[in-house]
Amino acid sequence: MKRPNIVLIYTDQQRWDALGVNGNTEIITPNLDRLAKQGVNFNRYFVNNPLCMPSRVSMLTGQYPSTLKITHMGVPVPDSTVTVAHMLKNYGYITANIGKLHFLPHANRDHRTVHPCYGFDHLEISDEPGSYEDAYRAWVRRKAPEELDKISLGLPPAAAVWQKTMGVQDGIVHPVREPRHAQAFASRDDLTHSAFVSEQTIEFIEQHQNETFMCIAGFYSPHAPWIVPQTYLDLYDQEKLSLPQYPEDINSKRTGERFSDEELRSVKHGYYAMITEVDHYVGKIMEKLESLGIADNTLVVFTSDHGEFLGEYLRYGKGYPAPDCVSRVPLIMSCPQGSSAHGTTTSQLVEGVDIVPTLLEAAGIPMHPQLQGQSVFGVLSGQSVKEKACVITEFHQWKSIRTDRFRYIAEVSGKESLFDLERSALEYENLAEEAEYQEVIAEMRGLLLKKLLQIEAPLPRDWAY
């Protein structure tokens, strides 16, 4: 059996509904929509943590954040952590991560130093576009050194504090961080972070086309700040973009200075344009696989680490309480040859820890005992798989489960929240105290408790005592 190559295309902060194939009539994503027609679109896929680092390490290890003891940001992933790269290596895979990985805090370190490999054979790490001397800036320095002062998207605040404390003078020109509007990239279109990820991914594929490989293409977009080449901004008419639908009590809190119609449309403009730029490069990667004649034996997976409020709940970014716009993200997988599942959409509940088991089953590799998810490879083969009653999103001192109809959140303080998505897809109305929902609350408590018992992960025994 020839094992398939694997290309995992990983964006940062992309909502599930920020794709044409998921019903968004405003966004331009022709290549991702085409990928969905060649595979399966899992339109109810949820991450296991609403922030970058915990979500990424959870997905790439197949373990829940609580098992890894990484439920919030800023925790360095131990070098000994077993990732999907380790699991594939024993079976002949050459593995790479190009672009964002975010297994280490990025604000308080020198990005020129050797990065822990985490099982990967090839690493070109760049967790923030242009902010640090890393693989991205080295790539631009080689291609167009005169453009180096134009590529930073801004120094993260925590990095500014660390550099001041440590007396670091990085010599990088940084613009003001995170404007609340779309902004044109100051340099050439072909020098963006997305262009870097695409070009180096394609180079890796070309170099290893005659081997069996897995490559993660770690795009930073559409993470804020919303800076993207004018080429992609010009594809949209900002004034025609829709606004979030707010309940009246939330809408009354909007002011002329924050969350105005103009600001909300501008933010969406930049966000959508960044996704369209990624879509362009997804097309480039797919074209390369096809031109090399290896597309039919390459499993392509597209997903994201979490979503984005995008002005809903009068917030930007991600985090608590992880409603669908934050915890629900795209998941598209291409189908193996001979499958009848091409172009299908499944609404069954799938979560981050299910990705690695799926990749291993696709490759005919036994499941590592640490894995806590379940493979959905059967769906790609046109078969059915056991459906989950709920999926979980974890954080420090609160946990949330999502069922077909409800989202339930339990906090260490004792506070409970319940949202009925049939009553309103917008999770503004907490029904936990409503008399008619008390039976539902009891059911949700039971589901959460059962889920927590299921995901216990004690250390393995050496022998019977």
Image (cartoon, rainbow, N blue to C red):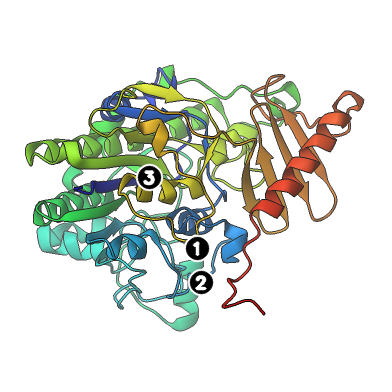
Q: Nearer the viewer, residue 74 or 83?
A: 83
Q: Please identify the quarter of the rendering in which residue 246 is found.
A: top right
User: Percent x, y for residue 380?
Assistant: 36, 32
Q: Nearer the viewer, residue 125 or 354?
A: 354
Q: Which mark is residue 157?
A: 1
| Circle 1: residue type | Pro
Q: CA distance from mark 3 to mark 1?
A: 22 Å
The residue carrying mark 3 is 11
- Is any atom of residue 70 visible in this view? no
| Circle 3: residue type | Thr
Q: Please identify the quarter of the rendering in which residue 378 is found.
A: top left
What residue lies at 56% left-to-right and 33% top-to-bottom?
A: 387
| Circle 2: residue type | Val
Q: CA distance from mark 3 to mark 2?
A: 27 Å
* Residue 459 versus residue 385 in the image, above or below: below
Mark 3 lies on a secondary structure that is strand
- Is any atom of residue 324 visible in this view? yes
Judged left or right of residue 280, residue 164 is right
What residue lies at 54% left-to-right and 35% top-to-bottom?
A: 386
Q: Earlier in the sequence, mark 3 or mark 2?
A: 3
The residue carrying mark 2 is 161
Mark 2 lies on a secondary structure that is helix
Circle 3/circle 2 CB separation < 8 Å: no
Circle 1/circle 2 CB separation < 8 Å: yes
Packing grade of label 3 (10 A; few <14, some 14-19, many >=20) is: many
User: Percent x, y for residue 81?
Assistant: 45, 70
Q: CA distance from mark 1 to mark 2?
A: 6 Å
* Residue 58 versus residue 459 in the image, above or below: above
